[in-house]
Image: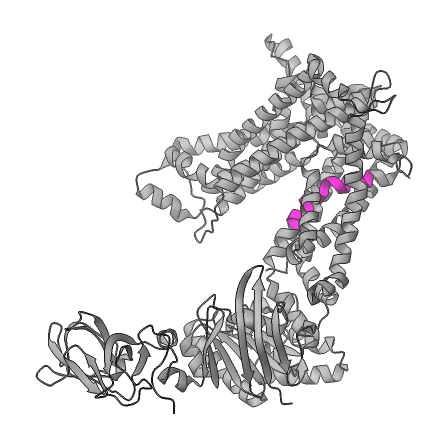
């Protein structure tokens, strides 16, 4: 009775309601709009399932979905198979140059996938340097990279680092005594890897696998560039939505909904499996890396270096070509800064946009995520539960679908935002929120509740406590999380490609456009600039997260 | 300032689950009052209701005449010491101690003077510019105390403040807390599950179990005259032995052995439960009259020797503690005869719920 009245005037409740309102306007409203678009006839406005019927009865469309599913599953499996052993090797054995390898792994994962795809085309495409080398000097024709295989290779190399990072984290929590106990009981080597280690980290494998699945499924740039005849659904959505002839918003909306249903099912399946398998581990004796001997040592090194080498190769090659001479659109012998000069001349705006748009988005994301995380961890109530679920929705919606929902919702009154910088910001914010909320919540959970209670008992008001105590303690964690968000935002393509206009082109959009136009020099120069931006951000991240003086 | 704390019929519920049912307390000014009980008994919950961190589902809470049920935490003027100290890690020791004073908007000089005073009192003045992570557990504990006391709180609340310290520091800080509490003269509620700590530190103790208060009293009262079987078990060690009481001749009977006992409040014959502390047995040679038993095990702990004796009449094994002597007189397997210091034993009803000894 008393409590209810107090609840009403609590500032946090008001903040929670405002946040819910924002989600209502920028996520739920566009989503309902999308649904109504998908089930309404364009002319008559009547309810119809015609789009869905068309989708499932036309093999052309249905195949895109099947293709997506096939290649995504293959990518997920491949990343698990490749990434898990790498993480295990890194945790258990000494490897020369491990630190550098780790940085390269992270860098290779941080770039936009379509840039990797583009680089692989330059290397292994029909007129790729490696292809030509084999053909001209050795007379061997190697199979081409386009289609299913190309997407599989590019995305696997792009995404296995996620598995690597997740599994490394999980292995860090495995107590070495468990391994020793297993050895003591007569189970060691490969057998132990499958009987003990894999089951121990299986919740992580599922979680990381889900992340890879979502990313691979939603990726637009890679299949667009390297897929050729192998059409996946983000490409189809894009074409249906963008193309001026024969394109159809309603149809694009219908495909979007089908895509969301699939991701939701996969998400729920993962949650279900994880829930039944979850257990907590804490390790007193971490696994210490030891020296391998003999053939084992050689194999370990070959595997690590080969994998990392291959995955960083596209970036290195792009970097290299950015300094080549250009003539017209293609490369010419000799080296110069011509591509960079051209890039700055023509698309300087893209560079500044890439600083401004993700910059603004980042501030908004961090600000909102801190509030949301605080409400969901510290102010548990029915409202916070609702906010929790709503804010996680974008996690399962592919980026291009988010782009479409925003466009459909905000290109007509009452709110017209299409073509503005704001809509780009909203797109980035919505997509990034689930991740930032989760990481912020994790930081918050490490701060004992009693610290805030101590402040309250010392006469500090709730808001004063939040700003003077909670926020400063979270600062280091929030900042390093923000840098990771920043990196994903500057390399984002699938939402931006739908929302951009001439004034709001970002680097990734520009790189993509230049690649499509065949402007090799400029695209290489821009891609290199993007990589440099990423590397600088990573260095800052490393610095902050390591010597964070707020050790909790 | 003199402050007494009154709690009338407190009720705490989490959802449909009642954690505290109808608890009443009357804590005197400047008293060190301890809430003692096993984990999950509701002692911390009750403390947090007084602090204002938990909502109150029923009852009234008073500091003197002032009802505090709906008062904001920040207005209650309490000093609280947490189990994990809850030192602000991003502030120096001095900033931690000054935090509460700053919230009260004192003048700068006052803040510095008061902070200095308590930094010195708690002997952490030399560490005043350090960050908490550079302090040991005991030093952090002192910071927490200084920070809680510097604001001149009406009451001091301490939630298991010693449980994170090692055994030696625990004894040292126990003394520090007791001394400071007497010196500052502040009404204090102290929560612990450690009965020895509670007895050492408290003026009075409330023994809690299952969200109810079992007994309130001085450490001596609680130890010597526990109100029921639970309190007798929880405080100190004891042996429970079933016996019968014969009202006509005022005798307590254990098998063949019996001894006179006149202090019971019951008027008719009854089955009873004796609670006899290990130190309240007198061990004699087997040819003396007494309760018969066989020594089954014996271990030497320095000051005392503990012996496990199997009683002949019901095969129950009881524990006996004697001061160690230079040469061991009773050996394992030897038959002995036991007497009890009858004025120190407790007699409970058969179900253990009631102490049958006459009051006063």
Disc count in the image?
Answer: 0
Vertical comparison of B129 with A132: above or below: below
Magenta stretch, overall SS: helix
- Visual colour scheme: one colour
Quadrant occupied by the C terminus of chain A: bottom right
Q: Is A27 situated left or right of B309 in this image?
A: right
Vertical comparison of A531 with B18: above or below: above
Quadrant occupied by the N terminus of chain A: bottom right
- Residue A7 locus on image (x, y percent): 72, 62
Q: Nearer the viewer, residue B67 or B269?
A: B269
- Residue A537 locus on image (x, y percent): 71, 44
Quadrant in which residue A327 is drawn: top right
Q: At 48% across and 84% down in the image, what residue appears?
A: B204
Vertical comparison of B156 with A432: above or below: below
- Toward the bottom, the furthest residue is B360
Q: Is residue B295 part of the magenta span, yes or no?
A: no
Q: Nearer the viewer, residue A473 or A529?
A: A473
The span shown in magenta is: A424-440
Q: Is A374 situated left or right of A427 in this image?
A: left
Quadrant in which residue A298 is drawn: top left
The reply to whether residue A350 is visible in this rendering is yes
The reply to whether residue A514 is visible in this rendering is no
Q: Is residue A430 part of the magenta span, yes or no?
A: yes
Q: Nearer the viewer, residue B152 or B154?
A: B154
């Amino acid at each position: 009775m008393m409590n209810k009245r107090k609840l009403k005037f609590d500032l946090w409740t008001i903040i929670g309601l405002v946040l819910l309102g924002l989600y209502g306007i920028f996520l739920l409203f566009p989503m309902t709009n999308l649904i109504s678009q998908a089930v309404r006839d364009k002319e008559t406005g009547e309810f119809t399932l015609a789009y869905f019927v068309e989708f499932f009865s036309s093999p052309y469309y249905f195949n895109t979905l099947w293709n997506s599913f096939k290649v995504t599953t293959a990518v997920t499996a491949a990343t698990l198979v490749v990434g898990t052993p790498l993480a295990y090797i890194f945790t258990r054995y000494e490897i020369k140059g491990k630190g550098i390898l780790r940085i390269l792994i992270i860098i290779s994962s941080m770039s936009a996938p379509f840039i990797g795809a583009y680089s692989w085309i330059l290397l292994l495409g029909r007129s790729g340097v490696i292809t030509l080398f084999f053909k001209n000097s050795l007379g061997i024709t190697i199979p081409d990279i386009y289609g299913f295989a190309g997407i599989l290779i590019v995305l696997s190399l792009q995404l296995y680092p996620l598995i690597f990072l997740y599994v490394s984290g999980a292995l860090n929590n495995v107590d070495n005594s468990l391994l020793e106990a297993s050895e003591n009981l007569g189970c060691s080597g490969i057998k132990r890897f499958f009987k003990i280690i894999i089951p121990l980290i299986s919740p992580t494998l599922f979680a990381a696998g889900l992340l890879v699945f979502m990313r691979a499924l939603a990726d637009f740039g890679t299949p667009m560039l390297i897929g050729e005849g192998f059409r996946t659904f983000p490409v189809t959505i894009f074409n249906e939505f963008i193309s001026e002839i024969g394109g159809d918003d309603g149809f694009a909306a219908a495909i979007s909904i089908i895509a969301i249903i699939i991701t939701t099912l996969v998400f729920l399946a993962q949650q279900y499996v994880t829930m039944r398998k979850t257990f907590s581990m804490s390790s007193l004796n971490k696994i210490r890396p030891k020296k391998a001997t003999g053939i084992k040592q050689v194999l370990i090194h070959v595997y690590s270096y080969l994998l990392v080498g291959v995955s960083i190769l596209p970036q290195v090659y792009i970097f290299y070509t950015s300094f080549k001479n250009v003539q017209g659109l293609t490369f010419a012998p000799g080296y110069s800064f011509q591509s960079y000069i051209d890039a700055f001349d023509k698309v300087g705006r893209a560079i500044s946009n890439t600083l401004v748009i993700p910059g603004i988005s980042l501030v908004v994301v961090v600000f909102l995520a801190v509030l949301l995380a605080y409400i969901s961890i510290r102010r548990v109530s029915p409202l916070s539960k609702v906010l929790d679920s709503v804010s996680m929705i974008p996690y399962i919606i592919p980026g291009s679908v988010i782009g479409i929902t925003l466009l459909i919702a905000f290109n007509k009154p009452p709110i017209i935002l299409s073509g503005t910088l704001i809509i780009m910001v909203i797109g980035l914010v919505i997509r990034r929120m689930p991740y930032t909320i989760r990481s912020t919540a994790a930081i918050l959970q490490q701060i004992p509740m009693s610290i805030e209670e101590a402040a309250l008992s010392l006469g500090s008001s709730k808001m004063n406590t939040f700003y003077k105590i909670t926020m400063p303690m979270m600062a280091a964690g929030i900042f390093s999380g923000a840098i990771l968000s920043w990196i994903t935002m500057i390399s984002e393509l699938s939402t931006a490609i739908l929302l951009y206009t001439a004034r709001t082109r970002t680097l990734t959009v520009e790189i993509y456009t230049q690649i499509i136009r065949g402007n090799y020099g400029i695209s290489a120069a821009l891609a290199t600039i993007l990589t440099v931006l990423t590397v600088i951000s990573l260095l800052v991240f490393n610095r902050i997260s390591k010597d964070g003086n707020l050790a909790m | 300032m003199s402050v007494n704390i009154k709690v009338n019929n407190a009720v705490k519920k989490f959802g449909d689950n009642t954690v505290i049912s109808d608890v009443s307390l009357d804590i005197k000014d400047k008293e060190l009052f301890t809430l003692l009980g096993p984990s999950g008994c509701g002692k911390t919950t009750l403390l947090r209701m007084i602090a204002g961190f938990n909502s109150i589902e029923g009852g009234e809470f008073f500091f003197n005449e002032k009802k505090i049920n709906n008062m904001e935490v920040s207005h209650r003027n309490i000093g609280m010491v947490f189990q994990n100290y809850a030192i602000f890690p991003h502030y120096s020791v001095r900033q931690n101690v000054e935090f509460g004073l700053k919230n009260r908007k004192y003048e700068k000089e006052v803040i510095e003077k008061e902070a200095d005073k308590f930094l010195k009192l708690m002997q952490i003045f030399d560490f005043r510019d350090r960050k908490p992570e550079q302090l040991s557990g005991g030093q952090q504990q002192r910071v927490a105390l200084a920070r809680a006391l510097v604001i001149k709180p009406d009451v001091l609340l301490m939630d298991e403040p010693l449980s994170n310290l090692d055994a030696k520091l625990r004894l040292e800080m126990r003394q520090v807390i007791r001394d400071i509490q007497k010196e500052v003269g502040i009404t204090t509620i102290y929560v612990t599950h450690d009965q020895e700590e509670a007895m050492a530190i408290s003026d009075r103790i409330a023994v809690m179990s299952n969200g109810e208060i079992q007994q309130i009293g001085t450490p001596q009262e609680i130890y010597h005259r526990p109100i029921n079987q639970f309190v007798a078990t929880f405080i100190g060690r004891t042996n429970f032995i079933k016996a019968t009481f014969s009202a006509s001749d005022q005798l307590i009977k254990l098998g063949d052995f019996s001894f006179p006992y006149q202090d019971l409040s019951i008027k008719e014959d009854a089955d009873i439960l004796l609670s006899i502390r290990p130190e309240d047995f007198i061990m004699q040679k087997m040819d003396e009259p007494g309760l018969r038993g066989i020594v089954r095990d014996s271990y030497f702990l320095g000051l005392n020797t503990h012996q496990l004796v199997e009683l002949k009449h019901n095969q129950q094994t009881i524990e006996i503690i004697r001061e160690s002597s230079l040469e061991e007189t009773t050996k394992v397997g030897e038959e002995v005869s036991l007497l009890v210091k009858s004025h120190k034993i407790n007699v409970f009803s058969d179900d253990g719920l009631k102490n049958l000894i006459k009051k006063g």
